[in-house]
Image: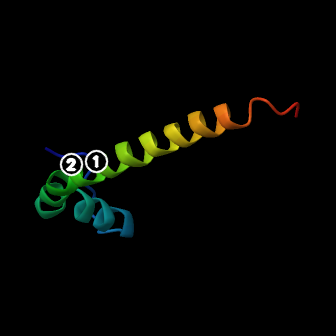
Amino acid sequence: MRFYIESDEDSFTDRILRWVFSEKNRERYLKYWWIISTIRIAVGVSLLLLMILAGYKFTHHPW
């Protein structure tokens, strides 16, 4: 599957696109996707809890 247009000259953009869409990089992306998504969920949940707890803690102040 090609995501870029092939041209006769080998430009810098073509080389970057070939590197990004290479088989090795796709395997790497899929291999570590679950780690990245787990970290994102953990950070999101912890920020949500901090906002909820801090919101309840400071609701009695007038500002």
Q: Nearer the viewer, residue 39 or 55?
A: 55
* Circle 1 residue: 38
| SS category of the residue bearing label 1 | helix
52 with respect to 11 (left or right): right
- Residue name at image x 29 percent, y 53 percent: 36
Does 60 appear above or below 43?
above
- Residue name at image x 12 percent, y 57 percent: 27
Quadrant showing the C terminus = top right
**Between marks 2 and 1, how big is the CA–CA gap?**
6 Å
- Residue name at image x 64 percent, y 40 percent: 54
| SS category of the residue bearing label 2 | helix
Which three-letter amino acid code belongs to the residue tagged 2? Trp
| Residue 48 disc label | none
Whole-percent x and y of residue 24? Answer: 12, 63
Whole-percent x and y of residue 52? Answer: 57, 33
* Circle 2 residue: 34
Whole-percent x and y of residue 57? Answer: 67, 37
33 with respect to 39 (left or right): left
User: Is residue 10 shown to the viewer in this render?
Assistant: yes
